[in-house]
Image (cartoon, rainbow, N blue to C red):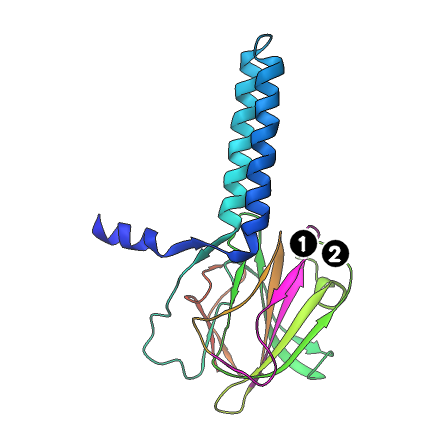
Amino acid sequence: MGKKFRKLRKIRLHREGTTTLVSGFAGLAVFNALIFYFLYAFSPAVCYVLLGISVVLYLVVLNFYQCPIRRFAGDDTQGVVVAPADGKVVVVEEVEENEYFHDRRIMVSIFMSPFNVHANWVPVEGCVKKVMHHNGRYRAAWLPKASIENERSTIVITTPEGTDILVRQIAGAMARRIVTYLDEGEECYIDEHLGFIKLGSRVDVYLPLGTKVNVALGQKTTGNETIIANL
């Protein structure tokens, strides 16, 4: 009981959702108040059904904006690449990365559904070498071309050992805002938030050839906890 209670205390709401949650609650409250005022006398059942739907929708959005406080459980972070997001692994393959490296890399892609937490975590410790934002389309995030055609933010982190890791936040069909908290030249660490993507999206990680990948297609990941690779 005590352990479960401590775990619950580590979950909070992300600051990116404050405006949406407040305005959404107010809008649904007004909508349901009007429904009950005008329709309750004629059809109470319809009023309660709409109220139930409103509650479910709000709980889905509330879950979306959760911001779990997580601490990496390992003792040593050297060479460790943790999952930058909650979601499902949709790509593990060797690809040509033509936007920054212009060579072949191993890409691990994690897709976040609207039911996942959408906070993003720093996958490796090191120094932020590059941060770039690219405008683009809003294709479904699971499509292969989304990595190069959708709106996205690209972050390159150099580990203490001198290895460059590229992380790409990609907007999806519903996403309209990507937030990146890192700035060029600053140090970053596992356990820190990298950013946030609103409403269905994905995060790609590009790793050097020869990296040991620890996840498989279809595997679910937990941000800042699942070790997706070892450099």
Secondary-structure class at tag 1: loop
- Local packing at callout 2 (Cα closer than 10 Å; few below 14, some 14-19, many 20+) is some
Dots 1, 2 in contact, CB < 8 A:
yes
Q: Nearer the viewer, residue 150 or 96?
A: 150
Q: Residue at x 41, y 84 (%)?
A: 78
Q: Which mark is residue 138?
A: 2
Which residue is the extreme one toward the left?
Answer: 2
Spatial separation of the CA atoms under disc 1 and disc 2:
7 Å
Q: Which residues are magenta?
A: 164-188
Q: Does the stretch in magenta take in 8?
A: no
Residue carrying label 1: 175
> Residue 171: x percent and y percent?
68, 59
The mark tally for this picture is 2
Q: Which mark is residue 131?
A: none
Q: Nearer the viewer, residue 120 or 214?
A: 120
Q: Does the stretch in magenta take in 174?
A: yes
